[in-house]
Image (cartoon, rainbow, N blue to C red):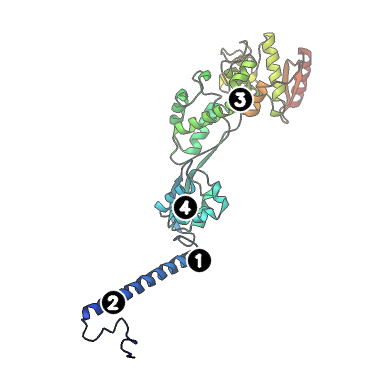
Amino acid sequence: MSQLGLRMTYDEPPKGGKHRGVARSTVLPIIGSLVALGFVALLAVVGIRAIAGGPNDFEGDGSGTVSVVVNPGDSIRQIGRTLASAGVVATSDAFVSAAQGDSRSQAIAPGTYNLRSGMSSQSAITLLLDPTSRDVKRLVIPEGWRADKILATAAKVTGLPLTDLKASFDRAADLGLPGYAKGNAEGFLYPATYEFGPKATADTVIKSMIKRFNKQADNISLESAAAARGLTPLEVVTMASILEVETPPAVYDKGARVLYNRLDRGMRLQLDSTVNYALGTQDLQLSADQLNTESPYNTYKQKGLPPGPIGSPGNAALQAALNPAKGKWLYFLTTDPATQTTEFADNYQEFLALKRKYLANVG
């Protein structure tokens, strides 16, 4: 038997054959080999990247200062895009990958942050969770403060002109002030802690405080609860503002009962706090001339509640104004200003006894 062709390969053409066919048969396996090698290389790169920790990411804590804004409602991916666009992290994918491995990332709050350029995603997350990296002005408003003090403090903390804040206060009706406030925002700048970014305006500040009041009013059903008491919401806020100044929190409800009892009997409220408000003072003891001041806020001369709040009440005072304690008291007096001890009396003779105690304590 002939052995012709038994050891022939595809690169060994038959004798007398043309070389054109040989070239085609040689190129095809080479291309196939290159494609296979490329695929293997791609798998190797993907595998190495997976082992290295996922998408491309910077290393370290970065440098310099970069200001970025996280908007309310931003998702983790949106935050990642913002950071990548600002050059804080390498890619949004890297940030998302790091966030998925760190449950704390769900606590990232809206605000303006001072971060660094070229940070690892994990470092960026750590800074976003650090309160000291937030570029905010923190404004703390205690219960009972008058609007003039609130505005002056807001101007000092935020750096906004006091004139701008007063202008926004005067046009509060356009910034969410409820209609029953009758255009006067006194008492409706809710006492709380606020944080304002570098782009905050005077309108932002006043609107935030009114919005906080409106939220609290909804929480306690202020309008319907006031109606059930036979009062308007404005009267409830006014009564609560008086409690903030006249009595300590522990006896707000008893103080509210005194106000209700005197109103029910047609008695004048006779409150130093309302006269002080009319005078723009905060005197502990008022003179006879001061008590004779002509003002709708002078409850020594005018019956009923004053025309509006004399400060900003908080939740406890609002709740007490809507839920007074049970009792027959007609008087209260802070008998010891040093300890804020406030006592109550059912009649004038008992009140005189409390007044003697007060005079003994103040010397």
Q: Which residue is mark 2?
A: 25
Of the 4 image quadrants, the one containing the C terminus is top right
Q: Which residue is mark 1?
A: 51
Identified by mark 3, the residue type is Gln
Q: Secondary structure at mark 1?
A: helix
- Residue 237 falls in image quadrant: top right
Q: Secondary structure at mark 2?
A: helix
Residue 115's mark?
4
Q: Residue furthest front?
A: 1
Which percent across, then down, holds residue 123?
51, 57
Identified by mark 1, the residue type is Ile
Which percent across, then down, holds residue 101?
55, 55
- The label nearer to you, 1 versus 4, is 1
Left or right of 226, for residue 340? right
* Earlier residue among tags 4 and 2: 2
Which percent across, then down, holds residue 209?
52, 31
Q: Residue furthest top?
A: 266
**Whether residue 191 is situated above or below residue 255 in the rendered picture:** below
What whole-number distance in Å separates the C-alpha atoms at marks 3 and 1? 69 Å
Q: Residues within 10 Å of mark 1 (few under 14, many from 20)?
A: few
Left or right of 58, for residue 311? right
Identified at 62% across, 12% down, the residue is: 304
**Whether residue 35 is situated above or below residue 195 in the rendered picture:** below
* Earlier residue among tags 1 and 4: 1
What whole-number distance in Å separates the C-alpha atoms at marks 1 and 4? 28 Å
Q: Which residue is mark 3?
A: 282
Q: Residues within 10 Å of mark 4 (few under 14, many from 20)?
A: many
Identified by mark 4, the residue type is Leu
Which percent across, then down, holds residue 248?
69, 27
